[in-house]
Amino acid sequence: MFGSNNLITISSITRFCRLSAIVDGIYAEHAHTAGSFTRLASDQLLVGGGADTKAMQGAKGMTNFVGCLRKVIFKAEGIETELIEAAKSGAAGATAWGRIDFQCREPKSDPITFTTRDSHLQV
C-alpha cells in the first residue's frame, strides 16, 4: 500500500480533544488529549528510521517499514511540509534520526518474452 513510489499524504486533524493522523485517506490513527485545543503547533520535525526490531527485547511481532517513499507531504493547520526533503536538507527544526537512506533503489527485473499466444508464466 505505502512506498509504491507514489505521493504519500499525511493529514493532521484536530477537533476539540481529538487528534487524528490520516495517511492517504486510507489509514488513520486517533488520540485524545486531557483538554480541548484549537491548534496543535510544533517547531520540531523528527523523521526517523528504525533500529532492527529483531535485536530489541519485547518487540515481538513489530516490524519497521521496509521500502521506498519518494514524496511524503504532511498537512496540518493550513501548512504543508515535504517531510523527506526537510529531513534530508536539514531544514530549520527538522532532524533525521536512525537508519535512513535518502535514495530509492530501482527494483531488479528480468525481461520475459512470450513467443506464442499459448505461452505463460507459472510462479
Image (spheres, rainbow, N blue to C red):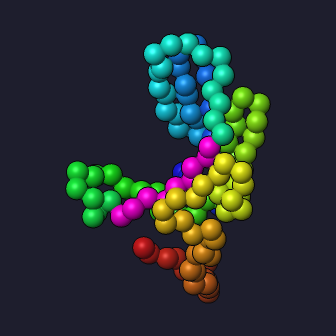
The image shows residue 101 at horizontal and vertical percentages of: 57, 69
Q: Residue furthest left?
A: 57
Q: Is residue 118 above or below residue 53?
A: below
Residue depicted at x 52% and y 55%: 48
Quadrant where the image shows the C terminus: bottom left
Residue depicted at x 55% and y 28%: 20
The image shows residue 37 at horizontal and vertical percentages of: 60, 16
Seen from the viewer's position, the closer of residues 88 and 26 is 88
Seen from the viewer's position, the closer of residues 100 and 119 is 100
The image shows residue 15 at horizontal and vertical percentages of: 60, 17
Q: Quick check: can you spot residue 94?
A: yes
Seen from the viewer's position, the closer of residues 22 and 112 is 22
Residue 31 in the figure: left or right of residue 76: left
The stretch in magenta equals 44-52
The image shows residue 114 at horizontal and vertical percentages of: 60, 83
Q: Quick check: can you spot residue 25?
A: no
Magenta-drawn stretch contains 62? no
Residue depicted at x 62% and y 43%: 44
Seen from the viewer's position, the closer of residues 83 and 90 is 90
Which of the 4 image quarters holds residue 88?
bottom right
Residue 67 in the figure: left or right of residue 12: left
